[in-house]
Image (tube, rainbow, N blue to C red):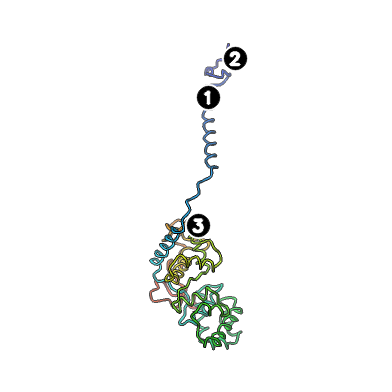
């Protein structure tokens, strides 16, 4: 005789336990199914994901060169963003650009070159007077020392002329490889790769290299591109870093090379929000040069005190 007692809803088919109904059985089955599904989902989430297929060196080189070609179309007017009229002015402006913006340098150098137009003039400057002129660029005492030192070296060792060789330039006070490559590439037409903070940041985002040291970055990138591309590549990458691929919040949603970027998504991906992050001519604002090239599509920068 069964131990279960028939109720209004009848007996269970298997357990024969009192008070258990057909509705209870369905609920129990549903709970068991849900638990199994949850367990399966958890197990699936915990399972290791397959790593993305590694990009071969050849594929990376092809992608890097395509990025350069596309940047050339986006920035056909790419240029040095320091105002200069001769190699000496470019050398001085580049030294001044350390730890400040090219805009601030461009706003400062007109008065500086009016006072000291040649290496001989700058070497004979009264330090306190030069410091006052270049104060807006920051670190003005150290920069004054470097500028007077390199001017004296140009006067005494190079006949007052800026040398056109890397090995000579890097011997001048305050001049490293970055400054030397800027001068060689833009004043002498000698190809060079300028690895500043923008250039280093972007080539790492694009997975061209994971090197942090500027000299090593320069060597890696030099092996990817033909020498004839080095100077303009530098301008294009720096332009892109200043206008779109910013350090803190890249405008990914407005980036023309987004399909080629393995770091897409690090910044704002919404197109409308991304457009609001664009700088200089890309955002409809003045550039960094007071005297930009004729083909520059943006507005000239304002003079010092006119911002």
Q: Element under label 1?
A: helix
- Residue corresponding to mark 1: 25
Q: Element under label 2?
A: loop
Where does the image place residue 98, in percent across and percent down from the top left?
55, 74
Where does the image place residue 94, in percent across and percent down from the top left?
52, 76
Where does the image place residue 76, in percent across and percent down from the top left?
39, 69
Real-space CA distance between mark 2 and mark 1, rounded to the nearest whole angstrom: 18 Å
Q: Residues within 10 Å of mark 1 (few under 14, many from 20)?
A: few
Residue 272 visible in the displayed image: no
Disc on the earlier residue, 2 or 1: 2
Residue shown at the point (52%, 17%) measured from the top left: 10
Residue shown at the point (60%, 76%) measured from the top left: 139
Quarter the N terminus occupies: top right
Residue 225 visible in the displayed image: yes
291 and 24: which is toward the camera: 291
Disc on the earlier residue, 1 or 3: 1
Residue 266: image tag? 3
Q: Element under label 3?
A: loop
Disc on the earlier residue, 2 or 3: 2
Residue 250 vs 86, above or below: the answer is above
Residue shown at the point (56%, 88%) measured from the top left: 156
Which one is closest to the eye, mark 2 or mark 3? 3
């Amino acid at each position: 005789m069964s131990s279960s007692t028939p109720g209004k809803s009848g007996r269970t088919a298997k357990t024969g336990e009192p008070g258990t109904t057909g509705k209870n059985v369905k609920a129990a089955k549903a709970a068991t199914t849900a638990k199994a599904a949850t367990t399966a989902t958890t197990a699936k989430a915990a399972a290791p994901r397959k790593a993305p297929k590694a990009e071969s060196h050849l594929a990376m080189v092809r992608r890097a060169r395509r990025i350069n070609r596309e940047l050339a179309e986006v920035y056909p007017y790419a240029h040095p963003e320091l105002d200069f009229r001769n190699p000496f002015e470019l050398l001085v402006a580049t030294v001044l650009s350390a730890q400040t913006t090219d805009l601030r340098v461009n706003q400062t150098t007109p008065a500086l070159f009016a006072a000291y137009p040649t290496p001989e003039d700058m070497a004979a400057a009264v330090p306190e007077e030069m410091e006052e002129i270049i104060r807006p660029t920051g670190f003005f005492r150290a920069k004054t020392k470097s500028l007077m030192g390199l001017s004296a070296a140009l006067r005494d060792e190079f006949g007052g002329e800026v040398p056109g060789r890397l090995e000579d330039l890097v011997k001048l006070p305050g001049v490293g490889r970055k400054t030397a490559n800027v001068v060689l590439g833009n004043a002498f037409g000698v190809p060079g790769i300028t690895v500043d903070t923008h250039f280093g940041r972007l080539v790492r985002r694009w997975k061209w290299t994971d090197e942090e040291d500027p000299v090593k970055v320069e060597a890696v990138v030099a092996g990817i591109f033909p020498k004839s591309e080095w100077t303009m590549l530098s301008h294009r990458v720096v332009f892109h870093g200043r206008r779109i691929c910013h350090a803190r919040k890249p405008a990914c949603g407005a980036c023309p090379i987004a399909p080629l970027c393995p770091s897409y998504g690090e910044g704002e991906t919404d197109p409308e929000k991304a457009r609001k992050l664009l700088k200089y001519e890309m955002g409809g604002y003045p550039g960094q040069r007071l005297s930009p090239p004729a083909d520059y599509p943006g507005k000239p920068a304002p003079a010092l005190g006119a911002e």
